[in-house]
Image: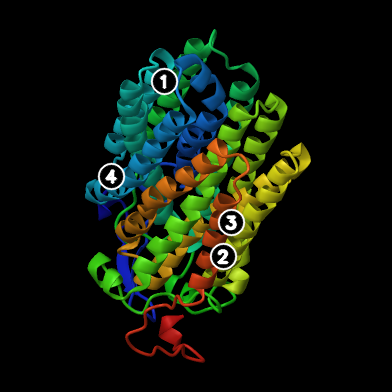
Amino acid sequence: MTDSHDTTVREVRDFYGRRYRVGESDRILLGRSRSWMLGLPWAAMLAISLFQYGYGVSLPTLVEDNGWSVWQAFGVLGLWVVLQAVGSPLGGWLYQRLRVRLAVPMLIGAACCLIALVTLAHSGDLVIVLLGYSVLGGLGAGLVYMTCIATVTEWFPERLASRVAMVGAAFGYGAIPFVVVAGYGLDPANRTAVLDATAVVVFGVVAVCGLLMRKPPRNWWPEQIDPQRWAVDRRLNRSIPHNRPATRPYPPLAALRSGMLPMMFVVVVLTAAMALFDIAYLAGTAYTLNLPATTLVAAMGALAASNGIGRAVTSSLADRIGRRGTLGLSLLVGGAAQFGLLAAAANDNHPAALVCFAALAGAGTGAGYSLLVSLVRDWFGDDATVPNYGIVYSGKAVGAVTGIVLAGLVVTSPDSVVPFVVAGCLGLLGAALTRWMRQPRPALVRLPSTLPADRL
C-alpha cells in the first residue's frame, strides 16, 4: 500500500488533535468495497462461535461417551475460555505488527480450531482433549476473534460501535445451527462424523477469510466523510453528546495508571462470570436432570441468539444514552436474569421460564464486550484501541473460572441457591461499578460553538 495510486493522500487533524489519513478510497486500497472487511470477519466469527455454546449442548453426549464427570467436562470448557481470552491479546499484538495481509494469525487460528474439533471427535482421554481442544482450540479462537475485531475497528472508524457489534454478535448467534444439530442429532454413534465434518467447515471458512482479509493504512479514514466535521458536528455524528472522544492517546501503561482500564477489566471479569455460569449451568443441568433435548436446544439457542442480538441493540442505544450508561444497564439486566434462572430452577426448570430468562441473561451479558471496544477507543484514543481492548478482554479468563465453578456447585448440589445469588450479585456489582467509571481528562477541552471556515 503506497501513496502512488492517489496523489491527494494527506494527513489531517481534528479539533482534538487526532490524526486521519484521507484521500484513499477503499476500492483503491482493496480493489473492492470495504464491506468485504465486514463480511469476512463476520463469517469467521460465525465459524468459531460453536466452541462455547456448541460445546455446552454437546456436553451430555461427551460425558456419557467419554465416561467423564460433570466437573471434568466443565474443566474442558473452562480451560478453553481461559486460553481464548489469553489468545486474544496475542492476536492484537500480531495484528499490530502485520503490514497488510492477515493470513498468519487467521491460518494459525484455523489450524488450531481444526485440531481442536478433530481431537474432540476422536479422543475421550481427558488430558489429550484438554491439550487439543482447550489449549490449542482456545488459543486459535482467540487469535481469530481479536484479528476480526481489530480489522473491523480500523476499516470502519466512523461506524465503530455498530460494525463491531455486528461482527461480535456473530460470536453468539452463529452457534445456533450447531446447537440444533448437536442437541437433536449428536450421539456416541455419529459423534466422530459430525465433529470431523464440522472441523473441516470451520477450518475452510476461517482460512479463506484469513487469506482475503487486509488491514488499512494507519489512521485511514473513508474519503466521503470529513473527519474534522465528524469530530464535532452532532448532525453527522449523533453519538457526540454522550460519547466524547479522548483528549489525548493513552497507551496501555498510561491507561492502566488512569485507573479506568483496570475497572473495565473487572467489568469483563464480572460479565464473563455470569455468561459462563449460564452456559455451564444449562449444559450441566440438562445432563444431571436428563432434560429433554427440546428444552436444552431452546434454552441454549435463546442464550446464544440474544447474546448476539443484544450487542446490536445496545450499540444503537449507546449513541443515545452513552456507552457507559448502556453498559451499566446491560449488566443490570444480566444480573437480574440470574435471579430469574433461580426462579426457573425452583419451579423444576419449567421450559418456558428457562428459555425466557436464558434469553434475558444472554442479552445482558453479551452486550458488554462490543460496548467496551467503543468505550476503550473513546476514552484512551484510536492508536491504542487494539492493545488496550486486548488487556480488558483478558479479564474473561478470570471470570470464566468463577462462573464455571458456580455452575458446578449448582449442578452437583441441585438445591443450592447461593451460586445463583452470587452470579446475580456479580451483575449488579458490575452495573454499580460503571457509575464510578469516568473518562480520563487531563485537561479541560471545550467544544467551539462555531468552527472556522478552514476547519469545515
The residue that disc 1 covers is 120
The residue that disc 4 covers is 100
Q: Closer to the camera, 366 or 427?
A: 427
Is 129 placed above or below 246 here?
Answer: above
- The residue positioned 64% from the left and 59% from the top of the image is 336
Distance CA(mark 2)–CA(mark 4)? 42 Å
The 10 Å Cα crowd at callout 3, few under 14, some 14 to 19, many 20 or more, is: some
Circle 3: element type:
helix
Three-letter amino acid code of the residue under disc 2: Leu
* First reached walking from the N terminus: tag 2 or tag 4: 4
Residue 25 in sight here:
no
- The residue positioned 60% from the left and 37% from the top of the image is 282
Three-letter amino acid code of the residue under disc 3: Val
* First reached walking from the N terminus: tag 3 or tag 2: 3
Residue 16, position as x, y percentages in the image: 37, 80
Distance CA(mark 3)–CA(mark 2)? 10 Å
Mark toward the viewer: 1 or 4: 1
- The residue positioned 40% from the left and 72% from the top of the image is 379
Distance CA(mark 3)–CA(mark 1)? 33 Å
Q: Quarter-wise, where is residue 334 in the image?
A: bottom right
The residue that disc 3 covers is 421
